[in-house]
Image (cartoon, grey):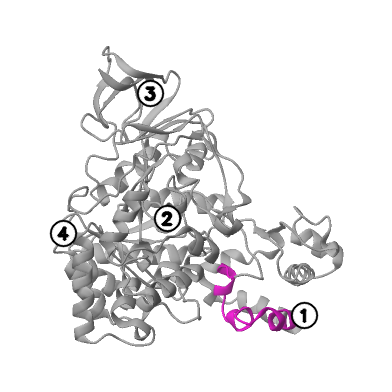
Amino acid sequence: MLDVLIKGGTVVDGTGAAGVQADVGVRDGRIVAVGDITEEAAETIDATGLVVCPGFVDPHTHYDAQLFWDPRATPSNYFGVTSMIAGNCGFTLAPLGDESDGEYLKRMMVKVEGMALEALEQGVPWNWNSFGEYLDRIDENGTAINVGFLVGHCALRRMVMKDDSVGHEATPEQIAEMRRLLKESIEAGGIGFSTGRSFTHSDWDGNPVPSRWAAEEEVLELCRETSRHEGTTLEWVADGCLNGFNDGEVELMTRMSVEGNRPLNWNVLTIDSARPDAYLNQIDACEKANDAGAKIVALTMPILVGMNMSLGTFCALHQLPEWKTVFGLDYPERMEKLRDPQTVTWLENQAALPEAGVFSRLTGWDNYLVGDTYSEANEGLKGRRVGDIARERGQRAFHTMVEISLNDDLRTVWWPLPTDDDPESWRLRAQAWEHEAVMIGGSDAGAHLDRMAGAPYTTAWLDDCLRGRKLTTMENAIRHLTDVPARLFGLRDRGRIAEGYFADIVVLDPDEVGATDVELVFDLPGDSRRLYSEATGIRRVMVNGVSTVVDGEATDALPGKVMRSGADTETVLAH
């Protein structure tokens, strides 16, 4: 007898092939039959008029902390994600040498990944030292999603070098110790190595995070160690991921992949018709590296991610040229600076410089919507465009934005409307999706919780494919969301609807699949806030043959597993 029989749906198997009407039989967590099935089952799901496809694989998340207080990994579970990769950008919560390491990493994650300090203190037990012990704690806690964890460079460096991990290069002896720790961590189940060299990543004290102080030889030694282990991969983020790669970065990531003999993925490729040269530079960098024997893959998002901003808390606006000289100040001094019209004009001019790079997408001040406000002076402004308010007041838009923020002691919530929602940008995106060096992903789910909402990209893209721009087929989109990332990471028997594969399955209504508008909710430990959206049209999500979501509601089941290198992943070579 089957455990589950999914009857009468259109099976889209993940390979890109056209959907076919077929039944799917599940037993002991695996798909055992696809076709016309007559065998009886303990549970039969009527999928008439519905699409049955593989569970989605999210290649770039930061659920490393959230899984402790939220083992369902909401909201990704609702959006059909059944497997994901965490520990990206060089940021992990293990290994830890002593209490000071945990305190440093905790505060670093607040700054670099927008996690609430209250949530990290109240929701995470911090009761491990080794990477293996961390993975065991996740397993013991349970998870509704399969998750593989990369080993982060910052934690390795911090454990070996302590305070010297910031501001100093490592000695040969320290590099050897980091390599030993990485070996131990991968042997315990880490699926590879991640590192970060991006100018956007600073710690609690405003200093570059530990991985940014590493010499190239240190990075390459850790990649070489990764190559010694089965089922591993590499990931990094660098300045060029945002602003275009220079020759040195192309050479480094080429050597990382070649000497590590593993694929290296980076986040995130932003495509904007106003900056076509940047997009072409990054594609060209991948092609050059791959021609030299590397396997470099850029992640890109197929939707425009909902996000908000604030002049009072750390956000992407702080990355605009020289803005940190004002926004790095304490509240009283910052507000005093912003009351000076000359300072506001200077900030506006700085934001318009070419050096703003990818962050220039955030400078369409006219098209910011006013979100939540907190003062009588701003009563009635919520939902209005800054440009409209500015014209009424006879001001420039950015000056109006600052004025409104000051009325709220800088707490005003701002929603920037995208400046890259034009037809040419979308044409370039559709073209990039089919490039061999590009993969869909980059949600950052689990991070930047009160500033952006990337988790809905799976169903939001399907909605766009079926009823919106229709830039690709549903079958091709599902391939990009399932089989493509599963094969890059070597996930054993995942990413397809096929006999012998794990029963990671999504049943969706093609007439309703999508995502609701993003809203701000207060549901994290310590009443911390996050941006949240709900999936529509998801009838069933199964992980390892067990239903985790039924008709949009999460079950109590936690059938996911920590995917460990070698056991749950197979080696994908760079060359």
Answer yes or no: do the residues labelled 1 and 3 have beta carbons within 8 Å? no
Please name the residue that numbered disc 3 is placed on.
10
Name the residue nearer the viewer: 356 or 128: 128
Q: Which of marks 2 and 3 is nearer the N terminus?
A: 3
Q: Which of marks 1 and 2 is nearer the N terminus?
A: 2
Q: Earlier in the sequence, mark 1 or mark 3?
A: 3
Q: Earlier in the sequence, mark 4 or mark 3?
A: 3
The amino acid pointed to by label 1 is Arg
Q: How crowded is mark 3: few (under 14 residues within 10 Å), some or many (20 or more)?
A: many
Q: If you read the primary sequence from the N terminus, does the residue marked by circle 1 or circle 4 appear first? A: 1
Residue 104 appears at what percent x and percent y?
43, 75
Classed neighbour count for the residue bearing mark 2: other residues with Cα under 10 Å, few (<14), some (14–19), many (≥20) = many
Q: Viewed as shown, does residue 465 lie left or right of 57?
A: right
Q: Quadrant of the C terminus?
A: bottom left
Q: In which quarter of the image is residue 18?
A: top left
Q: Is residue 362 visible?
A: yes
Q: Give the range drawn in magenta.
A: 314-337
| Residue at the disc numbered 1 | 339
- At 35% from the left and 73% from the top, the residue drawn is 154
On screen, residue 103 versus residue 346, left or right, reads left
What residue sits right under mark 4 in the picture?
575
**Mark 1 against mark 3, which lies toward the viewer?**
1
Q: What residue type is labelled 4?
A: His
Q: Is mark 4 on a helix, strand or loop?
A: loop
Above-or-below relation of 300 to 396: above
Q: Where is residue 514 in the image (x, y as percent from the top left)?
A: 53, 37
| Mark 2 lies on residue | 63
Q: What element carries label 2?
A: loop
